[in-house]
Amino acid sequence: MRISALVLATVICSLLTTATAQLSLPSVFSDHMVLQRGIPLPVWGVAPAGQPIRVEVLDRASKSVSSISGQAGVDGKWRVQLPALAASSSPLTLQVTCGTQTLSRSDVLVGEVWLCGGQSNMEWPIGASEGGAAFAASLPATVRCFTAPHDKAVAPLHDQPAEWLVATAQNAQNFTAVGSWFAAKIQHELDVPVGLLSINWGGSFAQAWTPARFAAGHPMFAELVTSQQQEARAYEQRSAAEKQLDMKNASAEYSGALAEYWKALAVKDPGFAQQWQSGAVHAASGWSTGVVPGEHGSTAGTESLAQFDGGTWWRRSVTVPQSWIGRELRLALGPIDDSDIAWINGTEVGRTTGLHSESRNYQVPAAAVASTTLDVAVFVLDTGGAGGMTGQADRIAIRPSSTDGLTAADAKPRALAGEWQWKRGLEEGGNFAPMPPEGASHPLLEWKAFGTMWNAMMAPVATYGIRGALWYQGESNSDRAEAYRQLLPLMIRSWRESWQQGDFPFGIVQLAAFQQPSDNPVEGEWSELRDAQLNTMRSVPGCGLAVTLDVGDANDIHPRKKQPVGERLARWALAQVYGKGGEWSGPLFQAAVREGATMVLTFDHAAGLQTVGGAALGGFAIAGSDGVFEWGTATIRGSTVVVSHPKIAEPVAVRYAWSCNPVRANLINSALLPASPFASDTNRAQ
């Protein structure tokens, strides 16, 4: 076979590059990492081609406690497997040597490592959770977290810019809340370090976390994968000029949509016409005092905004040093739920649309800083759920862009947390912002493309030693519950095979209650999705389920009570993974048997069946052969529940908590854990 001069030159260049490559490790092997105890540990990286590699773990006295040797391949890549290590809270050093090159990673602990995946409710930080500040301060330094940055890729990446962080009062504010409460409980029970691989992205779809090569072999998804790959090939064959034009047109369309969105808001909200961002602020004209930061309704003076969706205007003044006049400044407001516009002395300095978790950092032009008094104004638009300026108090401030020529005192930022004046504008729930363009980008980078997030965020750490995984996701897939019944087990299998560590434990968080309650006995896509999650737990070995109906929020898809979620996952892990015993699940439906005009239901995990607060049992709907469900009368009889309805003489089916927000549901067991929703007529219990 003939090789072209170009190909030959490329091969030679590649060989020369790998032959002289610097020794390196991926970012998951950073200072402060936690290694999984009790299993052989893969370690990998890049080195000069063909060169010998030695990996050692050293104690404080530089004595080797574990070591392994290997060799870099012709491509410069190397991989070895360290013998299993015992748990260690005493800092160790991971040292890699290749010839004269040595890499060391310090403050390495050995304990339990768990992968925390999913969308926004797994990503949700401690600092924005109920009781988060005190909890963050209580976490021991033996809890560490590695958080993958948001990214997408068309093929698996080898690394990503991230690092392990030690739990401190400050660092832990941004750790995954669910994962951290899980970690705290198992750390307390097992007395070993705990590491979390926090790899998640708000709004993501399960297919984005499933490698395409696995989906391609599944009968339900093969055609979709083929279609996505065909679109990708067609895209790649287009010229750079065509791609650039498409993106330019899509960006222009998005910019136009944003302009129209804000234009419509400006017409409806009186604050824009009356210029509430400037001028006097008086209580007589409707201004109130409220505390920032915090969700609307949760801080002093904002109680009336607890259920309000729409626009609010916020004002406060701050005195700054004389030396700031005529200087560019930086205005930091933290995350704002959902959109905002900010002004300084009546000059707009920035706006962000539809990014509730994105920190706002706006540049203030020098021309706007004409005196030592700065009037700060912010229009906050909340289109659903919680709203407000929700960041950390110590990070909401204004500071000089450059401190050149300033004294130490003048260089300090001026805090903006505390009392602001606010005024209610338009009511605008449900008016969500336009979505950024995707259609003009690579088809395999779209949010619903198989593997797009796996490739960029998960692949770089795949095979890093872990005990198991925790998964909180499903909101984005709730309109495709039947597909999710196949997709979630497929994703779990793809992770397990990619990690090459067997069928590691996999804990699933069932969707919490959300949306306004309905009096319809059976409704809601979320019911079907929860059933798919329950079915996965039953059908896939090594899975657990944390039911969270009782810690949801009708008005917010991001319930702030993350402690019960993490601790329920920990109860499962302690009982099923670590053999500590104890009840870890609420009642799980087993079977329904007709007895005359009643249906008798049996459950697993049914010891001590009772109701929350001793109230009448609710949440059960019953139907006859016509398939019409009515709210039933339900009573507890020992370890069973008996359901009936006076109009239904021959019942055939029972459903429980079968709605998006099943407020009637109150069945628990002696461990006070809630029962999972179920439908006896779907034949899905087994």
Image (cartoon, helix red, strand yellow):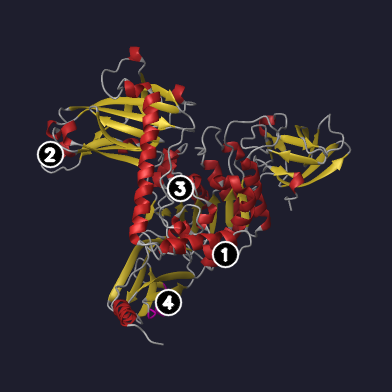
Q: Position of residue 563 (x, y in %)?
A: 52, 42
How many C-alpha atoms fall within 10 Å of the one at disc 4: few (<14), some, or many (≥20)?
A: some
Q: The residue under label 3 is which amino acid type?
A: Thr
Q: The residue under label 2 is which amino acid type?
A: Thr
Measure the alpha-carbon separation of dots 3 and 4: 34 Å
Instruction: Decide which of tag 1 and tag 3 comes sooner along the chain.
Output: 3
How many C-alpha atoms fall within 10 Å of the one at disc 3: few (<14), some, or many (≥20)?
A: many
**Mark 1 vs 3: CB contact within 8 A:** no
How many C-alpha atoms fall within 10 Å of the one at disc 1: few (<14), some, or many (≥20)?
A: some
Mark 2: which secondary structure?
Answer: loop
Residue 163 shows in this picture: no
Residue indicated by mark 4:
68
Residue indicated by mark 2:
407
Q: The residue under label 1 is which amino acid type?
A: Ala
How many C-alpha atoms fall within 10 Å of the one at disc 2: few (<14), some, or many (≥20)?
A: few
Residue positioned 32% across, 80% down in the render: 15
Instruction: Decide which of tag 4 and tag 2 comes sooner along the chain.
Output: 4
Instruction: Decide which of tag 2 and tag 3 comes sooner along the chain.
Output: 3
Residue indicated by mark 3:
176
Instruction: Decide which of tag 1 and tag 4 comes sooner along the chain.
Output: 4
Mark 1: which secondary structure?
Answer: loop
Which quadrant would residue 369 be assigned to in this image? top left
Please state the extent of the stretch shown in magenta in the rendering.
66-74
Nearer to the camera, 347 or 333: 347
Residue indicated by mark 1:
216
Q: Position of residue 502 (x, y in %)?
A: 58, 67
Mark 3: which secondary structure?
Answer: loop
Task: Identify whether 26 is placed above or below 291.
Answer: below
Instruction: Decide which of tag 1 and tag 2 comes sooner along the chain.
Output: 1
